Image (cartoon, helix red, strand yellow):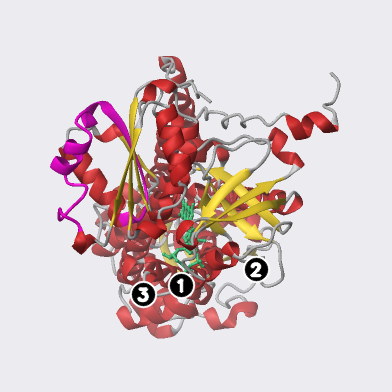
Amino acid sequence: MVVTVSENQRPSLVRQIAPAAVLTAAGVAFVSLLDNPNETGSVSLDFNAIAGRAAPTSLIPELEAPVVPAPEISTTLAPSPAMTVLAPATEPPAVQAAVACDGDLVASPTALFRWGGIQLQVHFTRSNAICDVAVLQYPADDSKSISINQRALPTYNAEVIAANSARISAVSGATDTWEAYTAALQAVIDSRS
Amino acid sequence: MSRPTTSSQVVATQPLLPPKASWVLDTDVGAVIGALTLVVVGLWARHGGVSSLGGSATDVFTSLASLTGLFASEAGILGLLLVTRTPMLERRYGLDRLFNWHRLLGEVMAILIVAHIVTSIEAWADPTGVMTAIRDLTGREPYMGLTTAGTVLILVVTVTSLKFFRERITYETWWFIHLLSYVGLGFSFSHQIVLGTDFMDDTIARWFWIALHVGVALWIVWGRWGTLIRSLARPLRVESVRAEAGGAVSLTLAGANLRRHRAASGQFYYLRELAPGRWWSNNPFSLSAEPTTAGLRFTIKDRGDASRAFTRIAAGARVAIEGPYGVCTPDLVGDGKVLLIAGGVGIGPIVSFLEQLSPTSQPVVLYRAHARAEVAHVEELERLAAAHGGRLHILVGARTTLKVPDPFAADVLLKTVPDLAERVVVVAGPESMVKAVQRGALRAGAPAENIHAERAWW
Ligand SMILES: Cc1cc2nc3c(=O)[nH]c(=O)nc-3n(C[C@H](O)[C@H](O)[C@H](O)COP(=O)(O)OP(=O)(O)OC[C@H]3O[C@@H](n4cnc5c(N)ncnc54)[C@H](O)[C@@H]3O)c2cc1C
């Protein structure tokens, strides 16, 4: 029996290019859908995902007892030597430093995230500007967490004072902390407006 | 339309139609690989992979760890798609090439995994040190114990597939070890979702990644188990068994469902005898006659346990078939002239090839065997060669007793087949012989795209 060559008609150019065009377009569309809120971090940020994962209990109001950390995560109580390290390692700009911290001292809710909780104490001026931030509590379960947070938190504190808002950029490698930190801070800011 | 009567089913033996041509183009495959790569690199870049490269050493390692991890996954996914036995891919490239690419991607994946492990440890080691990082990443972090176990399995599979080890263990042992790669990949998938910086915080990316993996898993299950179930559901029966020269046996498998089956000469099937103690082994054998509605013939030589069992099979035994596979079929020759070279039991596919050649092909058949007594199907070969205006050369003897050191050297080939460069060359036989022929035919002037063989992959 003779088998004839059937596949020697060359496929049209359209047939050759169309799948590549369609798949490339789909790929580009998909990639542009992805979250990319932060250029500096190596970790992506998705505030909704965090909120969706732990809300609505991710923010535990603790306004009554400002300095007492959330009881349910007592192990994440910042050890006091750590607090010393956290004391403004990066000095706020001189202009800011000159401002008198003569307003309210407010404790934030504890922002819970994967590695533990973050609670801030925010000092305002009489004109309602942020003049100082102290970290009351941060994840310190393991040496990795401690080192990441000790590196990032002073930077965040300084950035907040400079920006006078929660719109600060993340330190790369510490984006989880960034999310929790800004969430806690935003809660304080929201509660005063 | 009236159904064929019983008598016509028996009488009207017809050659089977060749398998339908695949609609897959190289450009389609390129498009899929390109798009997947685009998405993977896009994921990485979009999540800060590029900007981190300008950061601290830890940032750079974090970024590289995520990139190598993503690429390892991509290589794994593509490698798995190649062994799904998807007909449109198989028809286009042939199982042998798919298996070879699968192996290549497996090796690439193993290298990427090692790079991923090294960069991850470096990234994690800041500032607690490498030892802490290793401890964290091998068990203290969630799912990393599982991932470590999975990685070990994948690396075992890769190492046992290296030629050195592969040649030292039996096919079945290798195959069962190979199955562990599914377990390994499943285990290590967990850490990508839970710890992977690209997936833990980005919902869209996470669901895309999960969907991609589930899709591939379903595709594998469908392709492999579907093939198996179809083959078990409609086994063929051994219609006749014939002893051939040199201890080889030719068996013809028949069944009513062959009427709607499609196959071409030169293709092969996996055969599985449905008998106690035999059903789990599945071995490839080539058609040794043109496939017809009356049956599929295979010529099998005793080379080990499985093939020996087939040489002793009795008429009436049930055999499940998977196939046909292979793209080395007579339509490669078209209306041109052909040179067919067979070694040992490779003569089977060559006989089937001859039956489907066009009258213009003037086939020259070179048949190499160790001893005169091992030369099978001689009368058939002579008859078919003559019918197509061709000729048969038989070359017997151990290598050392031959007059020439290499019977497939270019000058030797050209002496027998002066118009070799104008012919399509088809080789079937042991790997060493296939290589020798490819070398010789190339030197003798045949273009590489005109030299065809079933590549060795086992
Ligand atoms: C595409 C193809 C076509 C073939 N056609 C024929 C043919 O027409 N006639 C014939 O006699 N032989 C043919 N073979 C070889 C045949 O498949 C092996 O001889 C048989 O599988 C050996 O199994 P065994 O258990 O008897 O021997 P073993 O001692 O287990 O193995 C002998 C050799 O066969 C290889 N092998 C074993 N099982 C498999 C398997 N399931 N898949 C792939 N390789 C395996 C082993 O690696 C080893 O190199 C073909 C092989 C391939 C790949």
Same chain for mark 2 and mark 1? The answer is yes
CB at disc 1 and ligand 1 closer than 8 Å: yes
Q: Which residue is mark 3?
A: A147
Q: Which residue is mark 1?
A: B170
Q: Amino acid at mark 3?
A: Ser
Residue B428 is inside the magenta segment: yes
Q: Which residue is mark 2?
A: B278
Label 1 SS:
loop
Chain identifier of the residue bearing label 2 in the image = B
Of the pair A74 and B409, the residue shown nearer to us? B409
Contact flag, marks 2 and 3 (Cβ < 8 Å): no
Residue B28 visible to the viewer? no
Contact flag, marks 1 and 3 (Cβ < 8 Å): no
Q: Can you say whether B310 is above or below B418 in the image?
A: below
**Which quarter shows the N terminus of chain B?**
top right
Q: Separation of disc 2 and disc 1 at Cα?
A: 16 Å
